[in-house]
């Protein structure tokens, strides 16, 4: 069996043996909870996926890999950050334009507190509008040459609520196979038929639509402007043509595209040279280049009017905090006024990605715009490499199975306008050195299996 098919280096047979034992115990637990004498408190061990999490944690403990997640930062996490009283180079921030902590952004947020307080207290339908919301939405609409836009309190909730408000049973959603969880969850909860297509492949999407379109009412194609796991981008013009041919709506998620793609950072449409009005629905987040929190939708006036009365995440959720709206608006104005920040992001990324690629490391299909994956092909190697880099002053997070297939386990480097050339060259040198050490390290898989057997018995 090829190594790429293994979980943490375990063969499918060894993993199946463990999962079967755990599944058997899980079934017994479920039976017991149905008895009258069962405890009335929630036992997390009964939750789906809990035992797989414990399996991964136990394997990491055996290998001496510390938990790389939820690290506590002591201040602003920019190109550098302080963790456990140690200053490190930071490659785990979506602050692509290096605006988090910018005086103009923080002053805008402080002024919004002075004027509006810290909350609007209820949904905007109930509590009324604030001028700062309207100003932000008008600025977002201008980016996409759209008639209108709307801002919501959460990016993930924006996709879930939007998709469910537009489609339902009897409709069709065709999306990229590597779509973000928020897209998949929104599609699933909508009740529409969901058909994924091969990553970045408009031909595969065309085939899926050709086979399923006639049997459904409304149809929606969903792609992302810039994929956060791989740093690659779709052929927007091809998907626009596809949508028109199949009488489908086209939606683009710009979460990682705004501020990064295009000469001015206006996203995929600018990058591709396509009129943004050719896209029916633009969606994005305010938490990355715009250093705030929330999500947005841009499109026709009729669409926004409908969504403001039908999207649950807008109608039944509190309106965006004035501070968040003001921070995002200030960042958007800086993006518009200082496009050189976008150029700096891309120059920095090209330098870093080129150094890794020239050393023979696998950075996948990254276009060199802020996101540089380093594919290790093994969750063990990803965990070990992340830990080794942290020990040498580099903060970068591993992406492990089941978030990605085991053979696609990786580290994800987020490069920003705030990283300096010397910093990037030194980081690349360390990454190359430690990658070679980890690749040559031997892992006693038999001992790992015995330890898992001992700590997670039947």
Image: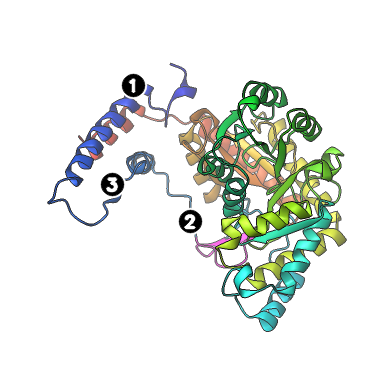
| Pointer 3 residue | 45
Would residue 275 be counted in the magenta stretch?
no
Against 338, is 111 above or below?
A: below
Range of residues picked out in magenta: 72-85
**In the drawing, what numbered circle is on residue 13?**
1
Q: Position of residue 417 (x, y in %)?
A: 76, 54
Write down the quadrant of residue 375 in the picture: top right
Question: Is residue 69 shown above or below 222?
Answer: below
Nearest to N terminus: mark 3 or mark 1 = 1
Q: CA distance from mark 3 to mark 1?
A: 23 Å
Disc 2 marks which residue?
A: 70
Magenta stretch holds residue 74: yes
Q: Depth check: 306 or 385 in front?
A: 306
Question: Furthest-top residue in view?
Answer: 1
- In the rendered structure, which disc, 1 or 2, sits on the residue that comes first in sequence? 1
Q: Secondary structure at mark 1?
A: helix
């Amino acid at each position: 069996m090829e190594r790429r098919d293994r979980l943490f280096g375990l063969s499918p047979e060894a993993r199946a043996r463990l999962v079967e034992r755990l599944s058997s115990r899980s079934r017994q637990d479920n039976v017991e909870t149905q008895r009258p004498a069962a405890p009335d408190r929630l036992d997390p061990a009964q939750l789906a996926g809990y035992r797989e999490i414990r399996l991964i944690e136990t394997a990491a403990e055996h290998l001496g890999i510390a938990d790389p997640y939820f690290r506590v930062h002591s201040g602003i996490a920019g190109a550098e950050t302080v963790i456990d009283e140690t200053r490190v180079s930071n490659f785990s921030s979506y602050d692509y334009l290096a605006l988090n902590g910018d005086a103009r952004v923080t002053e805008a947020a402080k002024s919004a507190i002075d004027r509006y307080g810290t909350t609007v207290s209820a949904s905007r339908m109930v509590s009324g509008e604030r001028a700062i919301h309207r100003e932000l939405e008008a600025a977002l609409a201008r980016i996409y040459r759209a008639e209108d836009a709307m801002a919501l309190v959460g990016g993930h909730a924006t996709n879930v609520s939007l998709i469910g408000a537009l489609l339902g049973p009897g409709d069709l959603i065709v999306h990229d196979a590597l779509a973000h969880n928020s897209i998949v969850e929104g599609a699933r909860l909508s009740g529409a038929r969901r058909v994924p297509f091969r990553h970045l492949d408009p031909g595969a999407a065309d085939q899926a639509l050709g086979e399923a379109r006639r049997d459904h009412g409304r149809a929606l194609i969903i792609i992302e402007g810039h994929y956060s796991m791989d740093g690659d981008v779709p052929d927007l013009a091809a998907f626009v043509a596809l949508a028109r041919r199949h009488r489908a709506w086209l939606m683009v998620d710009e979460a990682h595209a705004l501020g990064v793609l295009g000469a001015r950072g206006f996203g995929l449409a600018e990058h591709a040279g396509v009129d943004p009005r050719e896209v029916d629905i633009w969606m994005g987040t305010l938490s990355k280049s715009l250093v705030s929190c929330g999500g947005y939708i841009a499109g026709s006036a009729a669409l926004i009017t409908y969504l403001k009365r039908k999207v649950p995440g807008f109608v039944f959720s509190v309106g965006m905090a004035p501070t968040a709206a003001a921070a995002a608006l200030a960042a958007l104005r800086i993006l518009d006024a200082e496009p050189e920040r976008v150029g700096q992001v891309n120059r920095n990324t090209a330098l870093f990605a080129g150094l890794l690629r020239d050393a023979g490391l696998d950075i996948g299909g990254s276009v060199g715009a802020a996101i540089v994956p380093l594919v290790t092909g093994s969750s063990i190697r990803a965990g070990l490499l992340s830990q080794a880099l942290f020990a040498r002053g580099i903060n970068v997070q591993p992406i492990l199975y089941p978030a990605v297939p085991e053979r696609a386990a990786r580290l994800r480097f987020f490069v920003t306008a705030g990283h300096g050339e010397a910093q990037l060259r030194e980081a690349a040198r360390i990454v190359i050195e430690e990658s070679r050490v980890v690749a040559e390290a031997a892992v006693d898989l038999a001992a790992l299996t015995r330890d898992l057997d001992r700590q997670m018995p039947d």
